[in-house]
């Protein structure tokens, strides 16, 4: 009887070798809603951005060679759940690159619909959805994790909250103004 009791206690304390540890599962930390048939809506690509309507935001990583901004009028979430916007990247020497992009909150994906400069945007050939890297020096990571997407709900944040956070240099969900993301 004692041998059976010791055997049962011993088995109860053994940890399975392949036990799931959610803190180590780096690919599953974002909310992903149940899969259902998803169809992307038709996209109207803007001709250009409006320089007087740009809202700058900070990208961590010590890369101060570029200034990042979003055309405030372009940030919209479509009926398909994709949040689309025009991003403008300006070098310290004055060169300007722009692109019209979309983020799928809850899926950690982005897509580029058009590339351009300060002269206008040109639709990209066939662009596929790509995974957003987990690199704090990538502007898409900052937009996805800190500003546009709510990682807990998998839904986009309201545009007003996004722009207020950009102006204050903080994350949308951070109540502290100099939180540094």
Image: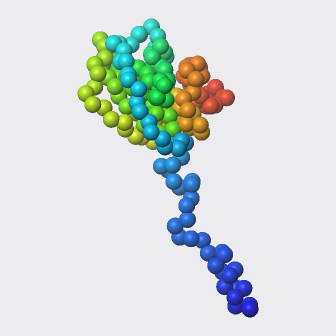
Taking the image as shown, residue 13 lies to the left or right of residue 33, namely right
Q: Where residue 61 sits in the image (x, y, percent)?
A: 45, 35
- The residue at the far left in this view is 125
Q: Is residue 55 visible from the viewing direction of this image? A: yes
Q: Position of residue 161 (x, y in %)?
A: 60, 22
The x and y percentages for residue 169 are 56, 24
Q: Check the image and name the residue furthest to the right.
A: 1
Q: Residue furthest front?
A: 37
Residue occupying image coordinates x 45% and y 8%: 52
Specify whether 167 is left or right of 4.
left
How far across and down, in percent of the image, does residue 53 sit?
46, 10
Q: In this figure, which colouring scheme has been used for the structure?
A: rainbow
Location of the C terminus by quadrant is: top right
Query: Is residue 98 shown above or below 11?
Result: above
The residue sitting at 57% across, 53% down in the picture is: 23
Q: Is residue 30 visible?
A: no
Pick whichever, 151 or 133, lies toward us. 151
Q: Is residue 13 left or right of residue 54?
A: right
Please tell me which residue lies in front, 15 or 174: 15
Q: Quadrant of the N terminus?
A: bottom right
- State the residue at coordinates (29%, 11%): 119
Q: Quadrant of residue 13?
A: bottom right
Choose between 157 and 40: the one closer to the eye. Answer: 40
């Amino acid at each position: 009887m004692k041998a059976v009791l010791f055997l049962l206690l011993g088995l109860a304390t053994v940890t399975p070798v392949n036990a799931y540890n959610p803190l180590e599962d780096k690919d599953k930390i974002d909310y992903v809603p149940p899969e259902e048939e998803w169809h992307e809506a038709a996209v109207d690509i803007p001709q250009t951005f409006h320089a007087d309507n740009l809202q700058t935001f900070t990208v961590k990583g010590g890369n101060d060679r570029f200034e990042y901004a979003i055309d405030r009028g372009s940030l919209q979430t479509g009926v398909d759940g994709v949040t689309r916007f025009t991003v403008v990247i300006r070098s310290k020497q004055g060169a300007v690159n722009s692109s019209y992009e979309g983020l799928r909150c809850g899926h950690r994906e982005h897509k580029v619909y058009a590339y351009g400069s300060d002269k206008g945007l040109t639709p990209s050939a066939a662009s596929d959805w790509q995974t957003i890297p987990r690199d704090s020096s990538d502007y898409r990571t900052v937009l996805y994790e800190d500003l546009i997407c709510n990682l807990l709900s998998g839904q986009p944040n309201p545009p007003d909250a996004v722009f207020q956070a950009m102006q204050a240099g903080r994350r949308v969900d951070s109540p502290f103004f100099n939180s540094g993301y």
